[in-house]
Image (cartoon, rainbow, N blue to C red):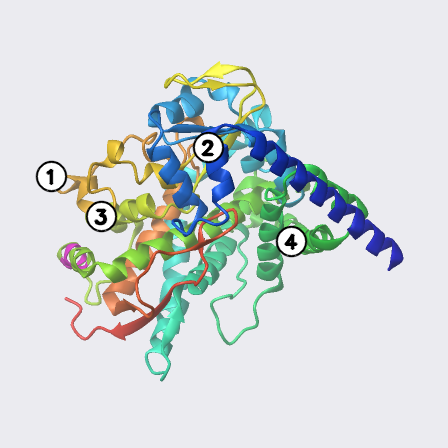
């Protein structure tokens, strides 16, 4: 106990000294951005840090700002985004600082590496995820979860006196079930309310949260010292990652025993046809679990918040389905049928424009450089493109940028993809999200099914949402809603 107390005290003193150092640097800095940083703690003008950044970026002539004391450059200029993600891609890797933060959790998985290791994993993943058989498999997994768990769960709340349901929590459970089935061929049954929450889901959540907390420390030395001494949040992170690792190793062993006779369609089985390296398999599948769970849940939550406030969009989605889906209950029967729903696709894209699952993405500049807007980027600078702010730029989306308007994505009734560098929700360029099509299958299927069965309304007055800190956008208050059954589904 005495050793742990002393270790905690050392870590606290280090943190305190670091904060004093930064405060001194900021107070003596004449940069307007740094002075705005000082006022943030007492300003009530903004509910979220992302809104504050949006305000600063809008008021910058180049839509780029530099916070000198933190060595951060932040941009919402799409020309700069294209420069980073395509033109000078090699000069803007994720960087070692990012890889270290998520290293214990994601290892050397595709989302946490650069260079040759990333290229190899991307090539292999593209070969598998690009197959129509994998997309059809994803559709089947999603449809089964919707029909057998999601719809029954929502229906059960219609009979309750207090029928408020937190959709954010429901979507997190739903997406974890789906991505585990798709990636591992394992069903954690998180959406089955009769079952206790899976140990894997709890450990996975904790690993994600504690890894994200590392990035919030003023210096990486804080969490590195705690990890070395195995105390506090780092001790909890180590324990939760151990549970994730044990599960991954167990599933890999089981798949190895089945050998080539296995007919499993899950992602792990596909990758095992290429390599038997257990560590590598663990890292890449855990990476896909993170990407496929939290981002999909966040995208669905933001979209349903908007749908509950815009019945005209809901009606348009239903009308399109009624015209194209011929089954009696209006249920989708194939992946190809889902692709025909153009307005639905537009609504999904519009929802993520306003509420992007990942609000910003960061890279590290390897060599001195200059952005297309003239901003000088010094070697070692952390460079972020701010997707949340980009969705609120009048220069990109026009004067109605705050309106939820799926029509902006349609030309003659057909979905039209805006320049990906203006809409980097799935990244863009060489690191475009490999799971993009899988995510869209899941999101569109859920929207279509829930809107065909139920009417939805917010259980709390509409107000500016507040976000929790984390790797993905999460509403502080969740998304409490009320559902009502539909009697006329035509």
For the residue labelled by badge 3, is the local secondary structure a helix, a strand or a loop? loop
For the residue labelled by badge 4, is the local secondary structure a helix, a strand or a loop? helix
Pinpoint residue 454: horizontal percent, then vertical percent: 26, 69
Give how far apart the Cα atoms at labels 4 and 1 are: 48 Å
Of the two numbered discs 3 and 1 in the rendering, the one whose residue sits closer to the viewer: 3
Q: Give the crowd class for mark 4: few <14, some 14-19, many >=20 residues within 10 Å.
A: many
Q: Which residue is mark 3?
A: 403
Pinpoint residue 41: horizontal percent, then vertical percent: 50, 48
Of the two numbered discs 3 and 2 in the rendering, the one whose residue sits closer to the viewer: 2
Decide which of tag 4 and tag 2 comes sooner along the chain. Answer: 2
* Range shown magenta: 318-322
Decide which of tag 2 and tag 1 comes sooner along the chain. Answer: 2
Q: Is residue 186 above or below residue 165?
A: above
Q: Which residue is mark 4?
A: 244
Give how far apart the Cα atoms at labels 2 and 1 are: 44 Å
Q: Which residue is mark 1?
A: 412
Of the two numbered discs 2 and 1 in the rendering, the one whose residue sits closer to the viewer: 2
Q: Give the crowd class for mark 1: few <14, some 14-19, many >=20 residues within 10 Å.
A: few
Taking the spot 18% from the left edge, 75% from the top edge, the residue there is 487
Q: Is residue 369 left or right of residue 99?
A: left
Pinpoint residue 220: horizontal percent, then vertical percent: 67, 38
Q: Which residue is mark 2?
A: 33
Which corner quadrant of the image does residue 399 belong to? top left
Decide which of tag 3 and tag 1 comes sooner along the chain. Answer: 3
Asked whether residue 417 is in view, the answer is no
């Amino acid at each position: 106990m005495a050793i742990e107390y002393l270790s905690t005290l050392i870590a606290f003193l280090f943190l305190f000294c670091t904060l004093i150092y930064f405060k001194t640097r900021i107070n003596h800095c004449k940069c307007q951005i740094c002075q705005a940083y000082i006022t943030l703690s007492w300003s009530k003008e903004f509910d979220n840090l992302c809104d504050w950044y949006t305000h600063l970026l809008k008021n910058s002539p180049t839509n780029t700002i530099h916070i000198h004391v933190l060595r951060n450059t932040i941009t919402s200029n799409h020309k700069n985004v294209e420069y980073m993600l395509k033109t000078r891609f090699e000069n803007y890797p994720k960087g070692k600082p990012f890889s270290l933060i998520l290293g214990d959790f994601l290892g050397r998985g595709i989302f946490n590496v650069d260079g040759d290791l990333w290229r190899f994993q991307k090539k292999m993943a593209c070969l598998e995820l690009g197959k129509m058989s994998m997309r059809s498999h994803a559709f089947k997994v999603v449809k089964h979860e919707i029909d057998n768990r999601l719809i029954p769960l929502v229906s059960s709340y219609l009979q309750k006196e207090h029928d408020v349901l937190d959709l954010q929590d429901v979507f997190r459970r739903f997406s974890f079930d789906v991505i585990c089935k798709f990636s591992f061929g394992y069903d954690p049954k998180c959406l089955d309310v009769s079952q206790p929450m899976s140990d894997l889901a709890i450990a996975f959540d904790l690993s994600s949260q504690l890894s994200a907390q590392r990035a919030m420390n003023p210096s990486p030395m804080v969490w590195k010292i705690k990890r070395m001494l195995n105390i506090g949040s780092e001790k909890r992170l180590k324990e939760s990652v151990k549970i994730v690792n044990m599960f991954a190793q167990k599933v890999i062993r089981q798949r190895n025993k089945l050998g080539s006779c296995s007919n499993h369609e899950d992602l792990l089985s596909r990758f095992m046809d290429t390599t038997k390296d257990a560590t590598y398999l663990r890292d890449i599948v855990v990476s896909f679990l993170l990407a496929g769970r939290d981002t999909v849940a966040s995208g669905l939550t933001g979209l349903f918040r908007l749908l509950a406030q815009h019945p005209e969009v809901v009606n348009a989605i239903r009308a399109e389905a009624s015209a194209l889906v011929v089954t009696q209950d209006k249920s989708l029967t194939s992946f190809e049928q889902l692709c025909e729903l153009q307005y639905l696709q537009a609504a999904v894209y519009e929802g993520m424009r306003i509420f992007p699952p990942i609000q910003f993405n960061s890279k590290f500049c390897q060599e001195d450089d200059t952005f297309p807007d003239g901003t000088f980027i010094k070697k070692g600078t952390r460079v972020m493109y701010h997707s949340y702010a980009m969705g609120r730029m009048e220069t990109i989306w026009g004067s109605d940028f705050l309106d939820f308007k799926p029509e902006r994505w349609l030309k003659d009734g057909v979905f039209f993809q805006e320049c990906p560098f203006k809409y980097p929700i799935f990244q863009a360029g060489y690191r475009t999200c490999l799971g993009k099509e899988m995510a869209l299958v899941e999101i569109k299927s859920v929207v279509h099914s829930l809107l065909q069965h139920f009417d939805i309304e917010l259980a709390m007055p509409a107000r500016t949402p507040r976000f929790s800190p984390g790797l993905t956008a999460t509403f502080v208050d969740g998304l409490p809603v009320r559902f009502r059954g539909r009697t006329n589904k035509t």
